[in-house]
Image (cartoon, rainbow, N blue to C red):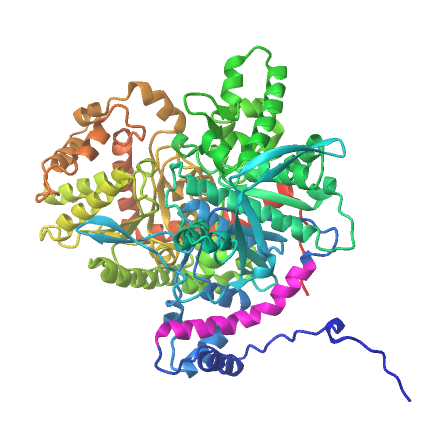
């Protein structure tokens, strides 16, 4: 008798067969999800059609996702973790279709079910888990890492409510909750089995174990962190990386002790408190607010992520792990100071749980951690009151004190007797309320500190971080930002993508340095190409005009110049300078001063932090000015102004491809980098901008003849600061005087007298940090140069092509290769 070897079924490896992606199979799978999984049928609400399609597409990511995961986990492989309180992802469906190369098949499949793919795609809510630049940058980084096959995982928070939805009522911003998970999220996979316990509160206890002093964190209130994974697909390379987002949950459904003691409501309340942590994204993007819940979010993310990375690293139970080796295989990039408590958390775990001595733990930590700064604004620098730490994170406070005292010893060795410097550099800010300076903790605890554009990194070294730069020059480096060309060209601008690929092939999509090959086509001999370039832009402008008509009830003429400023509303970004120019153009029309006139449609959009009063005033001002100008018969289409509500990732996908002039007009030295500027450039817009952030590098790449540069430089701004007399600009420039007078006259606020007085006061304040009036004349002149250039259609087309063709440097693929070369040092990993 033949005996077969018994193999228990759980040892039998099972192969995952890749699924077919022809239109017929896709259609059948879609129908299956719609009918059998969702229980919906033809004629159902459109979000179910989207959901069924998302599941159909997700199935086709699964094999690559698993293979990527396995390949990246091979022993000895080094991995990086991008830790960020924000990931501003936007929609996923269209992006995955592009990356997987199955858009045509899916289009056909949808057509067979009487659905238009573009309309189905619109039913996906934006994953708006970020405020602005910093959050969107994290999303672009994830995209590029997957495309470059870098083993990088994102760690973030799965906010129940993302960035608020903005709507406009009587010209004022109103906020509505963004319940993006309302209809479920077909992309995420809950992994309860990898949940982590996170401690808060309680106290520490010192005790001796085998004669060794040990410390434990006692009677804490614990919260559970549950991971949800989202797939991040690479561009046509079988790589699917992971974005792991943590949701907070109560340790037990109810706290049974309290429940049995009869305090039912107390028990429910503590459950709610636990769930509060991941409830909502804080909508501040440039000033810290010091709220306890925000500190809880930060520690929640840092602790869960570090514990998870350790779990992954030690996953093979039979092996011994020497934690002194942890840094050889793990590196954490901290997106601003928001997750910086991770420095102390890793120390705590290594010392208290893994029994390392202080010096060993510190060596590991400072070889694991890297910090990116995203702002020079002093009001954005995070500091937490010591008393809050004492109450919430007592053990971490002890560790931070110890880090600080050892650090200050180094400082006083280098600069004996320099108490000023000691006070400046101390992680603890002394005073009636004592604070922990998170940026200092980040610098001391990291082996790499970087800014996000050349000027920004230079200003960090010379200014804010100068003391630290003197101590550790080798830690400091620059990594100029980028944006992903997949979402911001290939997905957002398919017509231009096809036109470019026709000339230079398709390789530029995964290697944007090749877009340079387009430069020769800017030459005068390529008239037919130029015609087509303009036709693409015109079609994109029609698409934006339709959006503006629907959202703003303003009619844009697609043949006019589209002049766009979209970004968060902030005084340093100087939307006010734009408004002053708009009023100036209006006055020119009223005065019949129409030399070299160009019809313009000016679009402004962006959210104001709900507590930022001046920013909200600016939104009201834009809307009031728009209303007066748009309804003045004398203006007659020469000038149209619109404020687009709820500026977000998906609206930028329509806006950038349709823009002729990109407004990047921040006060020099204030915009760390900017990334909207890069999206516009890639889509063939010409920049009008100050010598600030990445504008400088854009200017270098495209050449001064294809860029409208104006305004004071950072060092001139600084020099002017103590002798700034704004009224003198009115005395010397009657056109500026006219603008301010019209504003003051109440012309734009007949029904609400005085509402813009705070704006006028701010502009005329000699302490105005943004020095709007100082740059008015230069700005108006540069705008007039824009108009003249626009009047020469061929010239403008050449500039437009040159901007796209010179944008190769601004791909996040390049940015990620630099992070990897200088900081992470990972080997790319091929799946399968
Ligand atoms: C604590 C509150 C808070 C929240 C967010 C303070 C500061 C922030 C961010 C640093 C704001 C931000 O998004 N900064 C932007 O980061 C982009 C990506 O590097 C840069 O391109 C922008 O210039 C910078 O303003």
What is the x, y in percent for residue 197? 57, 50
What is the x, y in percent for residue 472? 61, 26
- Determine the residue positioned at 67% across, 62% down: 831
Regarding ligand 1, which quadrant of the image does it lie in? top left
Query: What is the magenta range?
Result: 45-71
**In this rendering, is residue 714 above or below 53?**
above
Q: Can the viewer see residue 703 in this picture?
A: no
**In this rendering, is residue 738 above or below 125?**
above
Residue 48 magenta-highlighted: yes
Q: How many numbered discs?
A: 0
Residue 250 lies left or right of residue 557; in this view the side is: right
Predominant secondary structure, magenta span = helix
What is the x, y in percent for residue 61? 57, 68
Where the N terminus falls, by quadrant? bottom right
- Determine the residue positioned at 46% across, 30% down: 387
> Outermost residue toward the top?
417
């Amino acid at each position: 008798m033949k005996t077969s070897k018994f193999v228990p079924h759980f040892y039998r490896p099972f192969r995952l067969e890749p699924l077919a992606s022809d239109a017929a199979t896709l259609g059948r799978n879609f129908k299956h999800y719609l009918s059998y999984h969702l229980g919906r049928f033809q004629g159902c609400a459109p979000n179910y059609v989207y959901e069924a399609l998302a599941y159909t597409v997700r199935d086709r990511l699964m094999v690559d996702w698993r293979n990527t995961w396995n390949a990246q986990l091979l022993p000895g492989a080094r991995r990086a973790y991008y830790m960020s309180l924000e990931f501003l992802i936007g929609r996923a469906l269209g992006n995955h279709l592009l990356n997987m190369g199955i858009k045509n098949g899916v289009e056909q499949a949808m057509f067979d079910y009487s659905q238009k793919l573009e309309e189905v795609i619109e039913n996906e809510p934006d994953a708006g888990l970020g405020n602005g630049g910093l959050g969107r940058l994290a999303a672009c980084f994830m995209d590029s890492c997957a495309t470059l096959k870098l083993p990088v995982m994102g760690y973030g928070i799965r906010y129940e409510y993302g960035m608020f939805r903005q709507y406009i009522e009587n010209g004022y911003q109103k906020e509505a909750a963004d319940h993006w998970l309302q209809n479920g999220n077909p992309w995420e996979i809950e992994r309860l089995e990898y949940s982590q316990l996170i401690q808060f509160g309680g106290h520490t206890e010192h005790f001796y174990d085998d004669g060794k002093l040990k410390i434990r964190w006692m009677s804490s209130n614990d919260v559970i962190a549950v991971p949800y994974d989202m797939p991040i697909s690479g561009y046509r390379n079988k790589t699917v990386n992971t974005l792991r987002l943590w949701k907070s949950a109560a340790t037990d459904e109810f706290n049974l002790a309290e429940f049995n003691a009869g305090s039912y409501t107390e028990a429910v309340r503590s459950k709610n408190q636990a769930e509060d942590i991941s409830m909502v994204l804080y909508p501040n993007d440039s000033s810290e607010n010091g709220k306890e819940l925000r500190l809880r979010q930060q520690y929640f993310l840092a602790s869960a992520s570090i514990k998870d990375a350790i779990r992954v690293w030690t996953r093979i139970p039979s092996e011994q792990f020497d934690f002194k080796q942890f840094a050889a295989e793990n590196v954490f990039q901290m997106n601003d100071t928001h997750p910086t408590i991770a420095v102390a958390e890793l120390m705590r775990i290594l010392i208290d749980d893994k029994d390392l001595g202080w010096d060993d733990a510190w060596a590991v930590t400072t070889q694991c951690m890297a910090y990116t700064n995203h702002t020079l604004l002093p009001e954005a620098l995070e500091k937490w009151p010591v008393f809050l730490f004492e109450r919430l994170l007592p053990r971490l406070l002890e560790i931070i004190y110890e880090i600080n005292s050892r650090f200050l010893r180094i400082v006083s060795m280098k600069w004996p007797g320099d108490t000023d410097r000691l006070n400046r550099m101390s992680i603890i800010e002394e005073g009636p309320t004592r604070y922990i300076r998170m940026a200092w903790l980040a610098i001391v605890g990291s082996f790499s500190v970087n800014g996000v554009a050349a000027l920004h990194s230079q200003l960090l070294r010379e200014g804010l971080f100068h003391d630290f730069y003197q101590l550790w020059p080798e830690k400091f480096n620059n990594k100029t930002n980028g944006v992903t060309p997949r979402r911001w060209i290939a997905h957002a601008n398919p017509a231009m993508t096809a036109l470019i690929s026709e000339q230079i092939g398709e390789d530029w999509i995964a290697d944007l340095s090749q877009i340079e090959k387009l430069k020769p086509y800017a030459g005068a001999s390529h008239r037919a190409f130029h015609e087509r370039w303009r036709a693409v832009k015109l079609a994109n402008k029609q698409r934006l005009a339709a959006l503006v008509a629907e959202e703003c009830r303003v009619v844009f003429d697609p043949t006019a110049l589209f002049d766009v400023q979209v970004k968060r509303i902030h005084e340093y970004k100087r939307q006010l300078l734009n408004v002053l120019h708009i009023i100036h153009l209006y006055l020119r029309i009223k005065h019949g001063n129409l030399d070299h006139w160009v019809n313009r449609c000016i679009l402004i959009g962006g959210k104001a932090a709900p507590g930022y009063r001046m920013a909200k005033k600016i939104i009201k001002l834009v809307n009031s000015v728009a209303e007066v100008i748009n309804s003045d018969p004398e203006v007659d289409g020469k000038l149209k102004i619109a404020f687009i509500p709820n500026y977000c990732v998906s609206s930028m996908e329509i806006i950038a491809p349709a823009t002729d002039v990109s407004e990047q007009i921040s006060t020099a030295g204030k915009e760390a980098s900017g990334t909207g500027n890069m999206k516009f450039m890639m889509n063939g817009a010409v920049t009008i901008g100050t010598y600030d952030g990445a504008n400088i590098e854009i200017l270098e790449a495209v050449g001064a003849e294809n860029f409208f540069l104006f305004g004071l430089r950072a060092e001139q701004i600084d020099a002017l600061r103590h002798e700034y007399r704004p009224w003198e600009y009115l005395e010397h420039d009657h056109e500026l005087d006219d603008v301010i007078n019209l504003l003051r006259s109440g012309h734009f606020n007949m029904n609400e007298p005085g509402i813009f007085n705070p704006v006028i006061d701010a502009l005329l304040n000699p302490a105005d940090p943004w020095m709007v009036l100082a740059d008015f004349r230069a700005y108006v002149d540069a705008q007039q140069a824009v108009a003249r250039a626009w009047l020469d259609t061929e010239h403008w087309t050449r500039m437009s092509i040159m901007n796209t063709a010179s944008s190769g440097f601004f791909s996040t693929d390049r940015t990620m290769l630099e992070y990897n070369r200088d900081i992470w040092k990972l080997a790319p990993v091929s799946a399968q």
